[in-house]
């Protein structure tokens, strides 16, 4: 077994200190957020939307079933660090390639256990998401506090460029019966978004975040998907202009999470930073037309300002906890956007039919 230091701590920007025991060594800085999912830790770790963030899990036991390579949502973990109450060193069952602690050490993701996660989460709920540093290597609190004060906040960070692909590529699993060809902007796309579209008959070309509208049109695609991703949407002015040009071409467009926010900006709206964001698999979303409530998987720290959206944009779904915008559409045009993750992974499958509704407008 790999030897790791046994002491570690989390220091927040307001000076609050929480001590724990090292699971994986290292030092990392980032925005500290909490996730309320009861399972799916591997999918959370490998979601590119967590770039720049240290994640604390509210579920007290993590690692029970180990790590299986095929369950990853991208090629690597993207969280800066992981904080838990208890970490299982020896997973139950046989369907795992390695334990969660082994996985974290292999990828050099600093992690702590034996942390008072309830106290940390209560602190974040009261004060909002805060910058923090996790370390198992250093004890120079004054120096760490000074470095933390200089660490950038999430506002203004264009983290998409750190997670997007470098070249266009084709989803390697051909659809069972090709119904359409979609371009998917990779702002930090999760594998299950691509899988969900391909299983429904879509051929997929995945393109880098700053691909021009002209290049998309040259592909001859039937529609465009704007994926999830990390960071603040407002600095991505070039991306917003490309989306605005695609809207003018009347292509069917689906925005998911960050893609939802970027589509809203392209239509003339504004975004704002949430106090502590929505991170977990239990967010209730109310549909304004059907009256139905879906329990959804979410991971975002910014939201659209409903009052800033132009008249032709209809807010069709809202979050029941805080009434933030969860979905919108544009008149009778094939333009849809959702703030949650319809592909789940992890989370409930209440919203997966969104893919069917979008493809029904693409294939006509």
Image: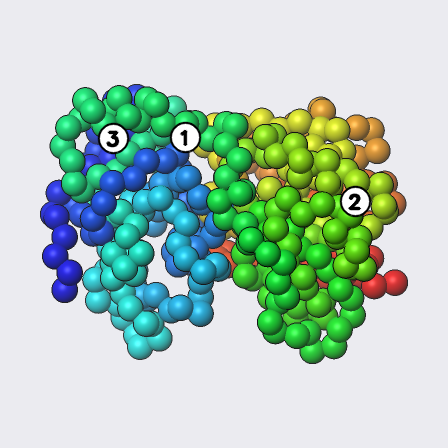
Disc ID at residue 129: 1
Instruction: Check disc 2: other Cα within 10 Å, few if <14, some if 14-19, many if 20+.
Output: many
- Residue under label 3, please give it: 11
Disc 2 and disc 1: Cα gap in Å? 34 Å
Q: Position of residue 271 (x, y in %)?
A: 62, 29
Location of residue 253 with respect to 73 vertically, above or below: above
Q: Nearer the viewer, residue 108 or 296?
A: 108
Q: Residue at x 72, y 70 (%)?
A: 201
Q: Nearer the viewer, residue 70 or 313?
A: 70
Asked which quadrant contains residue 318, the reply is top right
Question: In the rendered image, is residue 303 in sight?
Answer: no
Q: Position of residue 104 (x, y in %)?
A: 29, 56
Q: Nearer the viewer, mark 2 or mark 1?
A: 2
Asked which quadrant contains residue 360, the reply is bottom right
Tag 1–tag 3 contact (CB < 8 Å): no
- Residue under label 2, please give it: 246
Q: Nearer the viewer, residue 76 or 264?
A: 76
């Amino acid at each position: 077994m790999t030897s790791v230091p046994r002491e570690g701590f989390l220091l927040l920007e307001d000076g609050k200190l929480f001590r724990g025991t090292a699971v994986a060594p290292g030092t990392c800085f980032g925005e500290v957020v909490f996730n309320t999912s009861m399972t799916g830790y591997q999918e959370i770790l490998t979601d590119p939307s967590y770039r720049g963030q240290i994640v604390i899990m509210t579920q007290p036991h993590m690692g029970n079933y180990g790590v299986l390579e095929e369950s990853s949502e991208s090629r690597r973990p993207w969280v800066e660090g992981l904080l838990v109450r208890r970490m299982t060193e020896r997973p139950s069952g046989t369907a795992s390639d390695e334990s969660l602690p082994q996985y974290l050490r292999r990828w050099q993701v600093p992690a702590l256990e034996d942390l008072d996660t309830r106290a940390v989460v209560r602190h974040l709920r009261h004060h909002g998401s805060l910058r923090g540093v996790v370390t198992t290597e250093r004890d120079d609190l004054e120096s760490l506090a000074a470095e933390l004060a200089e660490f950038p906040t999430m506002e203004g960070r264009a983290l998409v460029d750190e997670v997007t692909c470098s070249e266009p590529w084709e989803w390697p699993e051909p659809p069972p019966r090709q119904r359409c060809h979609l371009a998917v902007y990779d702002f930090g796309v999760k594998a299950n978004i691509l899988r969900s579209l391909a299983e429904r008959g879509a051929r997929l070309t995945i393109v880098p975040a700053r691909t021009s509208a002209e290049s998309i049109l040259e592909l001859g695609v039937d529609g465009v998907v704007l994926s999830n991703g990390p960071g603040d949407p407002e600095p991505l002015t070039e991306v917003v202009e490309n989306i605005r040009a695609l809207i003018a071409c009347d292509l069917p467009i689906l925005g998911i999470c960050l893609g939802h926010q970027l589509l809203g900006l392209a239509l003339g709206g504004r975004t704002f930073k949430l106090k502590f964001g929505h991170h977990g698999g239990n967010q209730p979303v109310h549909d304004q037309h059907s009256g139905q409530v879906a329990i959804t998987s979410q991971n975002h720290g910014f939201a659209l300002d409903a009052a800033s959206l132009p008249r032709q944009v209809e807010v069709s779904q809202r979050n029941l906890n805080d009434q933030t915008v969860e979905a919108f559409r544009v008149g009778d045009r094939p333009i849809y956007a959702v703030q949650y993750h319809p592909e789940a992974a992890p989370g409930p499958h209440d919203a997966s039919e969104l893919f069917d509704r979008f493809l029904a407008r693409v294939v006509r």
